[in-house]
Image (cartoon, helix red, strand yellow):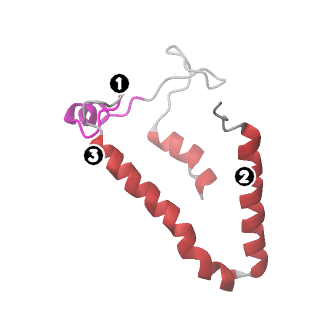
Amino acid sequence: DDVAFDIRDMQILGTAILAFLAFLVVLGVKHITKVAPFFLIPVLLSVLFIQIGIFSANSLDTPEGVTGLDPKTFDDNWEPGFTRTDAQGNPDQDGDAQWSFRALLALFYPADT
């Protein structure tokens, strides 16, 4: 039987990584700069795999909805298509709230800085 990756495994792994990072912070910036290249490797691998996925998405065995660098997809996504919502934020075509790029930037930017 294949053992599924359980949510508890994710919690244990996340706790271990968090404890390791907390330990690095306690050591100080001097030691953090020594291990920074090791943290950069997963980021660079992620960017590489995203690029590979984009350029290989036009093969015959891709799932439906994966278009890669199709000009039609680029054209379809060029203009914003923000969904109107009701007061609670639920999608509703007759809703009162009309989102814009500025409103979404004001909502999400503080959370990412």
Residue 64 is marked as 1
Q: Which quarter of the figure is the C terminus placed in?
A: bottom right
Q: Residue furthest left?
A: 71
Q: Nearer the viewer, mark 2 or mark 3?
A: 2
Examine the rendered structure and indicate whether residue 78 appears above or below residue 12.
Answer: above
The three-letter code of the residue at mark 3 reads Phe
Q: First in sequence, mark 3 or 1: give its number.
A: 3
Residue at numbered disc 2: 13
* Distance from Cα at disc 2 to Cα at disc 3: 32 Å
Residue at numbered disc 3: 55
The three-letter code of the residue at mark 2 reads Leu
The three-letter code of the residue at mark 1 reads Glu
Q: Residue at x 54, y 16 (%)?
A: 92
Please tell me whether mark 2 sits on a helix, a strand or a loop. helix
Q: Residue furthest bottom?
A: 30
Q: First in sequence, mark 2 or 3: give its number.
A: 2
Residue in the foreground of this view, choosing between 35 and 79 = 35
Q: Position of residue 76 (x, y in %)?
A: 28, 30
Q: Residues within 10 Å of mark 2 (few under 14, many from 20)?
A: few
Is 78 left or right of 34, judged from the image as shown? Answer: left
Q: Residue at x 35, y 27 (%)?
A: 65
